[in-house]
Amino acid sequence: MALKHNTQEEIWRILSSVSHISSSVQVTLNHPPVSYVAIGLDCLRTLHQCTELPSLLLELFPTARLTLSPSSSQVFEGDSLSLSCEEDDSSAGWTLRRNTARETRTQCGPDWGTSAGSSCNFSGVLLWDSGVYWCESREGATSQSINITVSGGAVILQSPVLPVMEGENITLICRTQTSSDLPADFYKHGSLLIDRPTGHVTILHVSKADEGVYRCNIRGHGESPPSWISVTGTPTTTALSPDPAPLLQVFTVVRYLVVFCPYVISTVLMVSLYRHRPTGSDLPVPMVTAAPVQAEQRLAEDFDDVMVVTTEHHF
């Protein structure tokens, strides 16, 4: 049975028990509504060792992902839409909420749309349905939000509703209510990006440089509303840098060893040599004096031999 915690103080107490949580999480928790799954993913991207956190968050706060059908950030007035909370735990009681120019944090069913469990359906959207939509559980956990723009014009730009990961490909479609194959000009931040004969453009291997405001124009029909495309960085798996304090301690110890070890070793060697040096009483006196004596004896013997040979010769 998953535990449920409703107060921020209790949530922070539990999250603080995870050894790799940074203090920045507390700041995030103080500004509801909070996507606790986003906190877990951010922890993985920045600290890289929060292996306990995602499972803990999934246990405390079941997650949901908001999907939109058709998947486009812009729609025509009168189009039918379906929003759904794809949930990990149906017992969390996910509901769809929105902020618009007219209302704040209103819920699907009582205030707008037709509720069907964790989904919400529009039979025909109106201009004032433009706004920010998200899933929210009874505990206050939220999904990632999406922006929906309802256009009363003749042209819309179909673009991703959720942030795109770096390295992915995205396709932008400039269309009217009846066709998506008309020649179109695509703009980024007001400057012409490219003109296409078919109304489609694909951006390969997107990066943060591709993030920005896009719109399109179909000559003879009109211009689409602007649409913001967000690009997020790819999660990194680089290991967490070690705490510099232990490294500094190790470096200090090594430094002292390098400085003092040669001194200690040389001192020990000198003491050892001093203690074992030969003294006057230890000199090998017999060996030293024996050599001259033996030499004198050999000379005397040689002299006697010479004298004998000389005497014999005189006889």
Image (tube, helix red, strand yellow):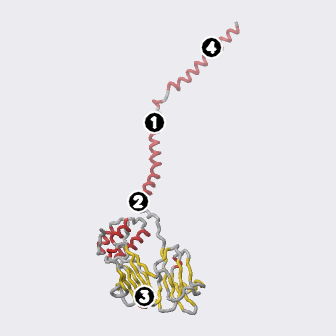
Kindly identify which residue carries mark 1. 276
What is the secondary structure assignment of the residue under circle 4? helix
Q: Quadrant of the N terminus?
A: bottom left
- Name which quarter of the figure residue 68 lies in: bottom left
Q: What is the secondary structure assignment of the residue under circle 3?
A: loop
Can you tell which mark lies on residue 304? 4
- Of 148 and 289, which appears nearest the observer? 148
Kindly state the secondary structure of the residue where label 1 is placed. loop
Q: Is residue 308 above or below residue 127?
A: above
Is the C-beta separation of discs 4 and 2 under 8 Å? no
Label 2: element kind: helix
Q: Label 3: few (<14), some or many (≥20) within 10 Å?
A: many
Q: Going from the N terminus, do you reach mark 1 or mark 4 first?
A: 1
Crowd class of label 4 (few under 14; some 14 to 19; many from 20; radius 10 Å): few
Using the image, determine if residue 135 lies above or below residue 179.
above
The disc label shown at residue 246, or none: 2
Instruction: Report the amino acid beneath label 1.
Output: His
Q: In front of the other: label 1 or label 4?
A: 1
Q: Earlier in the sequence, mark 4 or mark 2?
A: 2
Q: Earlier in the sequence, mark 3 or mark 1?
A: 3
Mark 4 vs mark 3: in front:
3
Estimate the x, y position of residue 196 in percent, counting from the top left: 59, 84
Horizontal side of 91 relative to 194 (left or right) equals left
- For disc 3, the marked residue is 130
Three-letter code, disc 3: Ser
